[in-house]
Image (tube, rainbow, N blue to C red):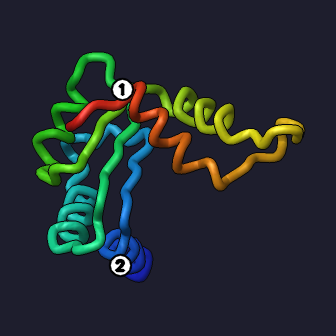
Amino acid sequence: MIATWSEAHKCLQTANELRIIGYSLPVADAYIKYLLKSAVIDSDHLKHIDIVCRDSDGATRARYKDFITFKYARFANSPVEGYLETLKQRTIARGMDNQQMDFNQLETAHEDFFANEGRDL
């Protein structure tokens, strides 16, 4: 278990982009908060933090806003299925059936989604 947490910490420390999908950052989840905060606090590589999560009453976005002080963080109030369907539809390669995706378009699809659905944290 310790090795898993250590590896997760190392991955987060060296990440250029963090995408948190479908995680509501519960108040009582101190382990994840510590992991995230300790890993990214001194990160020289981190460029963006993007969060996609359903948020019916604004409480989830508020928890993230209180927790994350990084200035390049965005939040999209969307169900995970909506986000994934958007990525799927925008990355289907032309002339291919729906089972093959053009992953070269994944970053563009993600940015398009946040341009339409996201806002600064």
Is residue 3 placed above or below 78 in the rendered structure? below
* Amino acid marked by disc 2: Lys
Please give the name of the residue rendered at 31% of the width and 54% of the height, measured from the top-left corner. Answer: 48
Position in image of residue 83 (x %, y %): 52, 33
Return the mark for residue 10: 2
Is residue 33 placed above or below 42 in the rendered structure? above
**Viewer-side residue, 90 vs 88:** 90
Residue at the extreme top of the image, as rendered: 57
**Circle 1 crowding by C-alpha within 10 Å: few under 14, some 14–19, many from 20:** some
> Mark 2 and mark 1 in contact (Cβ < 8 Å)?
no
Q: In this rendering, would 64 be left or right of 19?
A: left
Please give the name of the residue rendered at 23% of the width and 36% of the height, measured from the top-left corner. Answer: 120
Position in image of residue 92 (x %, y %): 74, 39
Return the mark for residue 59: none
Q: Quadrant of residue 30?
A: bottom left
**Viewer-side residue, 11 vs 31:** 11
**Label tally:** 2
Inter-mark Cα distance, 1 to 2:
28 Å
Position in image of residue 77 (x %, y %): 36, 26
**Circle 2 crowding by C-alpha within 10 Å: few under 14, some 14–19, many from 20:** some
Q: Quadrant of the N terminus?
A: bottom left
Q: Quadrant of residue 6?
A: bottom left
* Amino acid marked by disc 1: Asn
Q: Quadrant of the C terminus?
A: top left
Q: In this rendering, would 89 be left or right of 8?
A: right
Please give the name of the residue rendered at 59% of the width and 31% of the height, measured from the top-left corner. Answer: 86
Please give the name of the residue rendered at 52% of the width and 50% of the height, measured from the top-left corner. Answer: 107
Give the mark nearest the N terminus, 1 or 2: 2
Q: Secondary structure at mark 2?
A: helix
> Disc 1 marks which residue?
77
Q: Secondary structure at mark 1?
A: strand
Q: In this rendering, would 94 be left or right of 9?
A: right
